[in-house]
Amino acid sequence: NAGVTQTPKFRILKIGQSMTLQCTQDMNHNYMYWYRQDPGMGLKLIYYSVGAGITDKGEVPNGYNVSRSTTEDFPLRLELAAPSQTSVYFCASSSQRDTQYFGPGTRLTVL
Amino acid sequence: TQLLEQSPQFLSIQEGENLTVYCNSSSVFSSLQWYRQEPGEGPVLLVTVVTGGEVKKLKRLTFQFGDARKDSSLHITAAQTGDTGLYLCAGAMGNTPLVFGKGTRLSVIA
């Protein structure tokens, strides 16, 4: 059972480039989340989804976009990368609004 | 404004010592969870507490939910180097996503 998978594991972007962070879960969870974690800090919620076709903003949505066309996938899009978006990005899923299962993370550096 | 305050922010102890970390809020939560995150990995759920005053034990770890469901503590007995990591508390309230604290970074030295 793979749980939550994220790709890529590492990425270096130049300022202004765009990319999509992929997230897939195989637990048939309705809820999915994207967080960013800056060095030495906790988790900040970027976007979340309560089901296919439904997304909502979290605490720090600026500079990001998401879509949820299927239950399994919840990609996060960065359109114009900025150095402030250097962080570790975690995707998570849950069957209800509490217990969350996290992926291994994507470490992104914007230079 | 941080809804969940965790303390201490950093803790470095010798193997075999006991420790307690705290998670405090002025808000009431329907449940509270503790996660542990090891370097280079995502957080992993340790426990969920639901009832005010509830105490749960997981081997050497003891979790307590405050009577008013506003705070929680995690006590580790005889810490081991394998306990090293970032401990995050997260509270559930209403229909909103979990609220995470900033975490306590624990280092257990052999």
Image: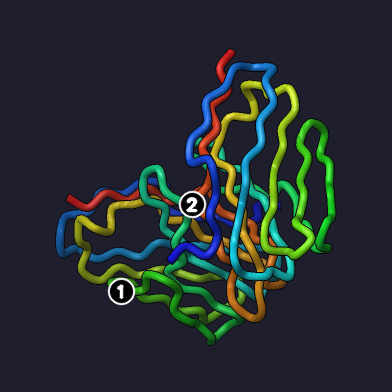
Frontmost residue, A43 versus A51: A43
Q: Nearer the viewer, mark 1 or mark 2?
A: 2
Q: How is the image coloured?
A: rainbow
Quadrant housing residue A30: bottom right
Q: Which residue is mark 1?
A: A62
For image coordinates 69% across by 52% down, the residue present is B72
Chain letter of the residue beneath label 1 in the structure image: A
Frontmost residue, A63 versus B78: B78
Quadrant housing residue B18: top right
Chain letter of the residue beneath label 2 in the structure image: B
User: Which image quarter holds the N terminus of chain B?
Assistant: bottom left
In screen coordinates, is A22 left or right of B36?
Answer: left
In screen coordinates, is A70 left or right of A110?
Answer: right
Q: Amino acid at mark 1?
A: Asn
Above or below residue A57? Residue A11 is above
Q: Amino acid at mark 2?
A: Lys
Q: Which residue is mark 2?
A: B102
Quadrant housing residue B19: top right
Q: What distance separates the C-alpha of mark 1 from that of mark 2?
A: 21 Å
For image coordinates 77% across by 49% down, the residue present is B64
- Percent across and percent down for residue B77 are 75, 27
User: Which image quarter holds the C terminus of chain B?
Assistant: top right
For image coordinates 53% across by 86% down, the residue present is A54
Q: Which mark is residue A27?
A: none
